[in-house]
Image: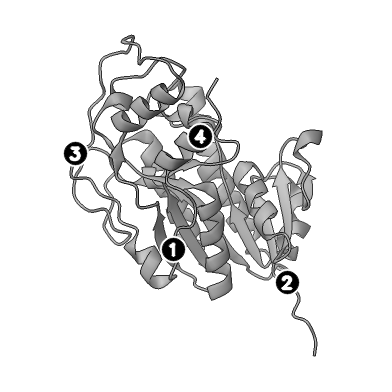
Amino acid sequence: MTTPTPRRVLVLGYGRLGRAFCRLYHSTYQIRGVKRTPIAPSADSPCEVVCLPIRDDALRPHLAWADVVLFCPASGRSGVDRETEQDSARYRETYLGNMESVTARLQEPGIRPPVVILVGSTGVYPRSIGGVWSEERSIPVDTPRQKVLLQTEQALIRSGLPYVILRCGGLYGEGRNPLAWIGRRAESSGIERSDDPLSLVHQDDVCGVIDRVIATGVTNDIFNVRDDSLFTRGMLAAMVAAHAAEPLADRAPAPAPQAPPDRLIPNDKLKRRLAYRFSRPPVTAYLTTSPAIS
């Protein structure tokens, strides 16, 4: 009996999430990463990694090789709402510009269209409007960052390629310091100490969802990917400060508008359609078992 050939997964934007996926599933899939800069020797991976920009012509044979393209954009910044025009332009190019380039190449002659999995963000939902933000709800534009996220999703959908969009909460796990969510050590802005509801998920669970998407063959769908934790930015800020044995300093600017307290991003579609069950500890348990933050 012939052993089936493993599915070939091309990871565009091979960063922490890509490395985690490779660590967990390199024996299940043939995984190849694409990264602009070389990986440091200490971050050696069991998967092949190609160093080139996503828009480089040399990407074409790698796209033709793939059964699945896993698009993991990362701008290096958390958003554009309070940033310079240069920061905003970089964010747009990283997300929307690269998505448009990749989907155009994937429709060129000689390339068999793969499934494109976009690792997006729950940041696509407006923060100023409450209620339940299910995957089917129409999304009004609230901020520049949110607009870019929404346009990136729409560019993938309009391409006609088979797709799955994962709207992920804030990622934590190996190599991800939770302090990044509340600012620098012993400092926290008013919004980060607020009652703004948070959606979080362990990066290994995101990898598990990606595996489930590939294994089930589901396409042309959108899923909210967040764990079952229910807490606010203020609660997380207090936890991180306590873990670091540092007080929350009162050096913050004026608070930004808070999200409505009834704002909810459900994950029941993920559990129902993919039968996924979260396996990693919630961030509350993760913080209590992780090394002291420095």
N-term mark: 4 or 2: 2
- Give the distance between the C-alpha atoms of the residues marked 3 and 2, in whole angstroms: 45 Å
Q: Secondary structure at mark 2?
A: loop
Which amino acid lies under the numbered mark 4 shown in the image of this protein?
Answer: Tyr
Is disc 4 in contact with disc 1, using a CB cutoff of under 8 Å?
no
- Give the distance between the C-alpha atoms of the residues marked 1 and 3, in whole angstroms: 28 Å
Q: Secondary structure at mark 3?
A: loop
Which mark is nearer the camera, 1 or 2?
A: 1
Using a 10 Å C-alpha cutoff, classify the residue at mark 1 as few (fewer than 14 neighbours), some (14 to 19) or many (20 or more).
Answer: few
Using a 10 Å C-alpha cutoff, classify the residue at mark 3 as few (fewer than 14 neighbours), some (14 to 19) or many (20 or more).
Answer: some
Task: Residue at 74% x, 80% y: name it.
Answer: 4
Residue 40 in view, yes or no: no
Q: Position of residue 247 (x, y in %)?
A: 37, 14
N-term mark: 1 or 3: 3
Which mark is nearer the camera, 4 or 2?
A: 2
Q: Which residue is mark 2?
A: 6
Which amino acid lies under the numbered mark 1 shown in the image of this protein?
Answer: Arg
Q: Position of residue 187 (x, y in %)?
A: 39, 15
Q: Quadrant of the N terminus?
A: bottom right
The reply, left or right, for residue 146 in relation to residue 48 is: left
Q: Which residue is mark 1?
A: 277
- Give the distance between the C-alpha atoms of the residues marked 4 and 2, in whole angstroms: 34 Å
Q: Which residue is mark 3?
A: 260
Which amino acid lies under the numbered mark 2 shown in the image of this protein?
Answer: Pro
